[in-house]
Amino acid sequence: MSEPIHVVCPSCNAVNRIPSDRLTQHPKCGKCKQPLFSGRPVELDESRFNKQVERSDIPVVTDFWAPWCGPCRMMAPAFEQAARELEPYFRLVKLNTENERAVAARYRIMSIPTLAIFLHGRELARQAGAMDAGTIVRWVRSAVR
């Protein structure tokens, strides 16, 4: 059996221990029984964001965005496509900087959209500006080696 990793449930925020070799077998949350991965970015508020970033053993790719931002809205389908390609080895999340100003300030988000990759509470990489799905996937994979 492979080493267990921690995966935070996108539905109930419970921390699950999953054998790493079972990530691709559509694992479900032990608490709420919902799928741990859906192939779609997860919308988060501050407390859920903090738990995902601090407790997940898989990298968390965050799209810092706002509803009024044209490039953010334009990149949304590409970010969703990237989620389908990158899960379950990465968790893709979206954080609305209008609603979660404290998080945006804490990470000094100066322009949107901005993508940032976190692992165990530490920022690994950051890229500002809209990207297509292929560029997002390549950037994420090259940033986390």
Image (spheres, rainbow, N blue to C red):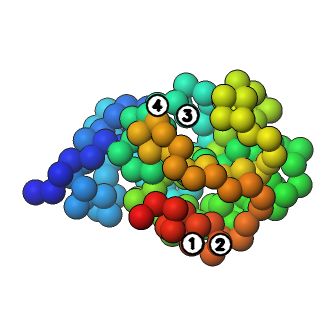
| Residue 98 found in image quarter | top right
Q: Amino acid at mark 2?
A: Thr
Q: Residue furthest bottom?
A: 134
Q: Position of residue 33 (x, y in %)?
A: 34, 40
Tag shown at residue 51: 4
Q: Which residue is mark 2?
A: 135
Measuring 63% from the left and 52% from the top, which residue is drawn there?
126
Comparing labels 2 and 3, the label whose residue is closer to the camera? 2
Position of 129 with respect to 31 (left or right) is right
- Closer to the chain start, of discs 2 and 3, is 3
Q: Amino acid at mark 4?
A: Lys
Tag shown at residue 138: 1
Q: Position of residue 17 (x, y in %)?
A: 25, 41
Tag 2 near tag 1, CB within 8 Å: yes
Q: Quadrant of the C terminus?
A: bottom left
Tag shown at residue 48: none
Position of 68 with respect to 44 (left or right) is right
Q: Position of residue 45 (x, y in %)?
A: 62, 30
